Amino acid sequence: MLIKKQLKIGLTLLCAVLLGACSTPQLNFRVQASDTLNADENGNTYAVLLRVYQLSDTDLFEQSAYEDLWKADTQILASSLVSVHEFTIEPSLSKTIEVEKEEGARYAGIVAFFRSHEGNWKAYRKINHGLIPASTQMSLTVSGSDIDLQYR
């Protein structure tokens, strides 16, 4: 009787793992933008263009300058670029952005194209990969002219 119960539990767990492996992993970013987002010298706030890059490595991303990524990101990131998605982030926005994880992606890179690029305008984090696909949960805070990307 005990063996049957253990077998049922084992089969249930195996099914759950296999079903999870069949789902497409996502990159989920919980975005929180401040009401002072991308402000000018008069205090007027503006939307920001946000690019989400999926990268195979981060060397080129780390070395890239603001202007280079703005004008020629696909050429600059070259072989390390797996995919890119663009989003507009409005002041005071609170939402979740979901991007399907692409094959070969190991890192998520974020660039926010602020009016002033004096602050922290780019960040990256390693994304989940391995035998069992899993989504990666992150939080992205966009405030003033800075971004902060963290795992949740």
Image (cartoon, rainbow, N blue to C red):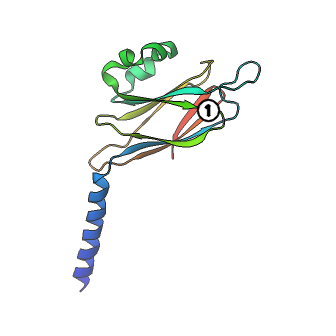
At which x and y percent is residue 113?
55, 22
Task: Give the side of residue 135 with respect to residue 91, left or right.
Answer: left
On screen, 118 above or below 125? above
Residue ID at (28%, 53%) = 21
Where residue 144 sits, quadrant-wise, is: top right
Where residue 104 sits, quadrant-wise, is: top left
Task: Looking at this view, name the residue that lies furthest to the bottom.
Answer: 1
At which x and y percent is residue 132?
29, 50
Question: Which quadrant is the N terminus positioned in?
Answer: bottom left
- Near mark 1 (Cα within 10 A), the count class, few <14, some 14-19 or many ≥20, is some
Viewer-closest of 87 and 112: 87
The residue that mark 1 highlights is: 90
Number of numbered discs visible in the structure rendering: 1
Residue ID at (33%, 24%) = 80
Task: Give the side of residue 46 with respect to residue 105, left or right.
Answer: right
On screen, 13 above or below 108? below
Residue type marked 1: Glu
